[in-house]
Image (cartoon, grey):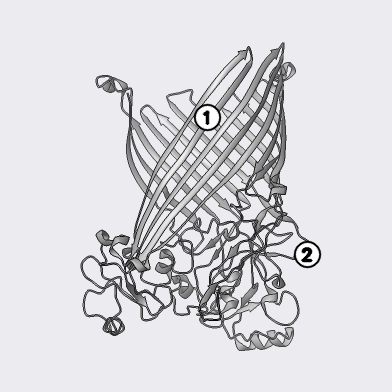
Amino acid sequence: MTEDSEFGAVINNAILMDPITPVIYTGTLPAHAQSALNAGNPLSRDENGNYYGISDFVKGEISNPIAQMHNTHQETRQSKVVGNVYGELEPIKGLKLTTRFGIDAAFQRNHSWSPTFWYSSERLNTVSSVTDNNENWFNWQWENFANYSRKFGKHNLSLLAGMSAIKMGYNRLNGSSSGMFAEEDKFAYSDFTPDDVDRIAGQQNYKQLLSYYGRVIYDYDDKYLLNVTVRRDGGSVLPPSNQWGLFPSVSAGWVVSNESFFKESVPVIDYLKIRASWGINGSLSNIGIGQWASVITAQGLRYPDASGAFLVGAEAANIANPALKWEESNHIDIGFDLMMFNNKVNLSVDYYNKTTKDLISPGTAPGFAGFALPFVNSGDVRNKGIEIDLGYRNDDNEFKWEIGGNLATLNNEVTYLNPFVQRLPGTGLGTGYTATFFEVGYPIWYFRGYKTSGIFQDQAEIDKYKATTGITGYNPKPGDPIVVDVNGDKSISNADHTFIGSPHPNLLYGGRVNLSYKGFDFLMFLQGQAGNDIFMGFNRVDRPTANKPAFFYNNRWTGAGSTNTWFAANTNSEFVYNSDKMIFNGSYARIRQLQLGYSLPKPLLTRANITRARLYVSLDDFFTFTDYPGMDPEAGSNNANSLGIDRGVYPIPRKLMFGLNVSF
C-alpha cells in the first residue's frame, strides 16, 4: 500500500475522505451507491457481505481507506544468511595479520493480487491481476589488514595498513498477469489467468567498493594522544574518471588529568581530556548504479513503416553527467570530556563544523536540453553547532539514582551552488507546486511559497491595500490572506514565492532518569527537538471537496475582527495552500520510554536454578507534547528533498508492553 504520498495513500485517504461517508453500508444503499451498482460497477464488500462506503462528494484517487486495506492482498517472505570467518596470524611479536570474510544474503518473495473494485469513476480496477516478485541480494566483504603495536618506554605506537573489498549484487525476476479465474487467494497465481496477458520482467546488477587504508595511533604516557588515518576509496557507481577519492583524518588529545601538576592542584576532577579532530569522509549513499549515465528508453516510441506496421524506436531519457564525483564531508570537532567527584559527574562538550561539499542530489537541466539531468554535485552545505552531555550518578546507598541530559544546536546552511543556477527545485507537492528548494544562504531544501501578513477583515481594507500597493493579479475578498509582494513588482504571482520555513531543528535534546531501590527499578527516556517547521502537505487544492482537519473550521475567519491569523473557509486557493499558512511549528518532546521493573529476590530464584528474573511494564512513545495540529510531529517525509512535509503517513504508535527477563 502507498504511504507518504498525497495521491491515494491510506492515511492520506483517511484524512481527506469526507466524514459523512460510512465505512460500510448496513442497510439500504444510498442513491449514488445503488446507481453505481446498477451500472455494473464492482463495489467492494467486507467479510460479512456489507458494501464499503463510497463518497458522493470526494472523487479522484481519494477513497475509503478501510476498503483500500481490505482489497490489498500482499505477502512478503524473506530468508537471510549472515556470517563471517576470519583468520589471524602473529609471525613476530607485536605484528598481527588478519583476514576476514563476511556475507550478507537475502532471498525475498513478494506475492500480491488485486481484485476488481470501483471507488469512483476516477479510481477503479476492472480486471483482477496477480504479481509475483522474486528479489535476491548477495553482498560480500573481504578485509585484509596488518596491525603492529610496540611500546618504547612511555611511548605507545600502533600501525595499521589494509584493504577492503565489497561487492553488492542484486537480481530480480517478476511476473504479472491479469484476468483471474476467481478473486480468491487460492486462485491468485498466474496459472489461473490467460496466457496471452502474462508479463515478465527482470534485472541484475552489481556495484563494488574497494578501499585501501592506513592508520597510526600514538600516545605518550597516556597524556598526549594522536591518531592519523588515510583512506583511498573507489566506487563503481561513479563515472570511470571520478571513481576514486582520498579521505584523510587526524585527531589529537591531551589528558590533562594525568599531569602531575593537575592532580595536586585540582583534586575534585578525576578526569579531563581536551581533544580536537579533523577529517574528510566520502559518501555515495545518494546515487545508484548507472545514474550518472545516459539512459536509453523505448517506452511509448513506435513508428509506422511503409506497410503500416509499427517499429519500436528509442531515445535518450536523460543527459549523462560524466563529471559526477564523490560527495565529501569535511569535519572539524573540538571538545573536552570531564569527570568529577569520584566519577559521579560527567560532562562532555563539543563544537562541530561539518561542511558537505559536492552534495549529490537530483539535478535540473535547462529547458532547451530536452532531457532530464538525474544527478549532479549540486553544492556545499554546512552544519555547525554545539553538543553537550551532562550526567550525575549516585550509587553510594541502597537507593541508587542517575540523571542526565544532552542537547545539540544545529545551524544548517547552503554555502555554495553553481553560479549559473540561482536555486535548485526540490520536491513537488500536489499538482503544479514545487515546495522545497536548494539555495545559497538558506537551509537545505527549505520551504518556499507565498508569505502572508494577516487576514483581510473587510472590503475597505482590501481597497486600501490595492490603492496603496497598486497590486494586480490578486483579487482577494474578506477572509483571504494578505499576500506580501516580495519582489515589489506590484503583482502577486509565483515570482513572490520566498522562504517560509525550514524543516531542520535548531535544537535537539534528550533526558534520562534511572532509579533503583532494592528490587525495584525505574527508567525514563525523553527525546525532543525545537525550531523546525512542518509543511502540512496532505491538503489538496485540486480536490476542493476533500475533507480538511477540524481546526480549519473551528479557527476559520467568520467576520471582521474574528481572527487575523486564519483564513475564511477555502478549499482551493494557492495563496492559502502554497503559503506560510500551511507551515506549522514542528517542535515536540516525546517520552520514548517509561519502564518500571522488579527483580525477584535471589533466594527465591536459587531454588529454581535461576540467576536473575525481572518483571517489567513499559510505556513506549506513549506521551507526546507538541503544538503541531497534524497526526504526528515526526510524521514528515524522510526523503532528502521532502524532509518535513507531512503528506499523511502512519504516526508512531503508542506501545504498552509487559515482559519477563530470565537468566540461568
- Residue, disc 1: 393
Percent coordinates x, y for residue 158 in the rendering: 68, 21
In the rendered view, tell whether residue 309 sits above or below residue 113. Answer: below
Residue name at image x 67 percent, y 33 percent: 212
Question: 14 or 474: nearer the eye?
Answer: 14
- Decide which of tag 1 and tag 2 comes sooner along the chain: 1
Indicate the quadrant where residue 124 lies. Answer: bottom left
- Residue, disc 2: 420
Q: Secondary structure at mark 2?
A: loop
Look at the numbered discs 1 and 2 and tell me whether their residues touch, using CB distance below 8 Å. Answer: no
Question: 67 or 507: nearer the eye?
Answer: 67
Per the rendering, the mark at residue 142 is none
Q: Which quadrant of the rendered structure holds the C terminus?
A: top left
Q: Secondary structure at mark 1?
A: strand
Q: Nearer the viewer, mark 1 or mark 2?
A: 2
Q: CA distance from mark 1 to mark 2?
A: 56 Å
Q: Is residue 196 visible?
A: yes
Left/right of residue 164 with respect to residue 73 in the rendered view: right
Label 1 environment density (alpha carbons within 10 Å; few <14, some 14–19, many ≥20)? some
Q: Is residue 72 visible?
A: no
